[in-house]
């Protein structure tokens, strides 16, 4: 019996051969199995139908007054939670600190799925602002930063943050058309987008979600620090002044 190539398995599975041997499927198949999962598609269809129906009914004033406001808050919170998870664990992808119990391709698959989900829920959040019973805004107020008559700074930060998130998502979809350097630079836009969306929630939210925002920021900064430390160590550390 020949001895298995443990080193090769570690290179693929982030230091855990079991992650590679657990599923013999190709990496692309594992990643697609996450994004193209039948149940995920059905849930997305059901959620999209529910949100679209609620938006139309709210626009026609056929729903109770608080419904649009409740959905406005709910979509914003859910979008932020999905984004927080994406940013926090996205920094660990391809590093030694990545979850060892999940195959590498599946990590990227879930990362992309959650990013898209955060973007869609963020878009729905903006749409429900247009039909809110108290602070309804025209399309211009939602799409143009600073054009909102309600909390223009906070709403503008939300708009810019969502545009940044869309840029990150599209850069991943177009990754094969971009150089690695350009893709990485665009992908780093996730951090300022996350910061702007956090400020948006703090400035506009009427709920007491300070613990949520604080925890999300702490986790994102922690994993970013872990990845930065690993990258510096991998490249031999920062240069020492005076050393040749």
Image: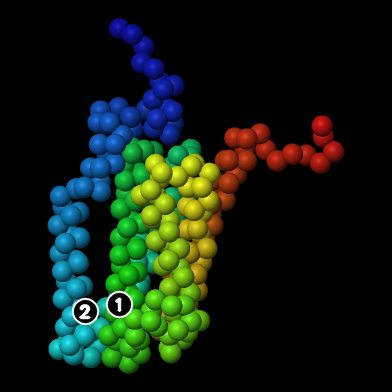
* Residue 43 drawn above or below residue 184: below
- Residue 51 placed where, x, y %? 21, 73
Among the 4 quarters of the image, the one containing residue 209: bottom left
> Neighbour class for label 2 at 10 Å: few (<14), some, many (≥20)?
many
| Residue wearing tag 2 | 55
Is residue 78 visible from the viewing direction of this image?
no
- Contact (Cβ within 8 Å) of mark 1 with mark 2: yes
Rendered residue at 35%/73% (across/down): 76
Extreme residue toward the front, this view: 177
Cα distance, mark 1 to mark 2?
8 Å
Rendered residue at 16%/76% (across/down): 53
Extreme residue toward the right, this view: 242
Is residue 41 visible from the viewing direction of this image?
yes
Report the side of 132 relative to 219 (left or right): left
- Of the residues under marks 1 and 2, which one precedes in the sequence? 2
Front-most of 112 and 177?
Answer: 177
Among the 4 quarters of the image, the one containing residue 75: bottom left
Rendered residue at 34%/62% (across/down): 118
Front-most of 40 and 128?
Answer: 128
Report the side of 233 relative to 217 (left or right): right
- Residue 121 placed where, x, y %? 31, 67
Extreme residue toward the top, this view: 1
Number of marks:
2
Q: Which mark is residue 74?
A: none
Rendered residue at 25%/48% (across/down): 35
Quadrant where the image shows the C terminus: top right
* Residue 207 drawn above or below residue 168: below
- Residue 227 placed where, x, y %? 54, 45
Q: Which mark is residue 127?
A: 1
- Residue 23 placed where, x, y %? 26, 31
């Amino acid at each position: 019996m020949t001895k298995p190539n443990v080193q090769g398995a570690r290179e693929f599975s982030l230091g855990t051969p079991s992650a590679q041997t657990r599923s013999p499927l190709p990496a692309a198949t594992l990643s697609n199995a996450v994004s193209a999962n039948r149940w995920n598609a059905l849930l997305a269809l059901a959620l999209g139908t529910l949100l679209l129906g609620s938006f139309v009914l709210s626009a026609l004033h056929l729903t109770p007054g608080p419904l649009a406001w409740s959905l406005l808050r709910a979509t914003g919170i859910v979008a932020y939670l999905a984004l927080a998870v994406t940013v926090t664990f996205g920094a660990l992808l391809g590093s030694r600190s990545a979850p060892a119990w999940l195959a590498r391709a599946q990590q990227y698959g879930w990362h992309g799925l959650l990013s898209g989900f955060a973007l869609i829920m963020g878009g729905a959040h903006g749409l429900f602002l247009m039909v809110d019973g108290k602070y309804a805004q025209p399309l211009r107020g939602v799409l143009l930063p600073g054009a909102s008559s309600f909390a223009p700074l906070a709403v503008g930060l939300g708009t810019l943050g969502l545009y940044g998130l869309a840029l990150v998502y599209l850069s991943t979809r177009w990754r094969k058309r971009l150089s690695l350097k350009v893709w990485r630079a665009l992908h780093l836009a996730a951090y300022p987008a996350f910061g702007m969306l956090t400020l948006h929630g703090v400035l506009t939210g009427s709920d007491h979600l300070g613990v949520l925002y604080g925890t999300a920021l702490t986790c994102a900064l922690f994993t970013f620090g872990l990845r930065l430390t690993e990258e510096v160590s991998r490249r031999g550390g920062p240069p020492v002044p005076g050393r040749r």
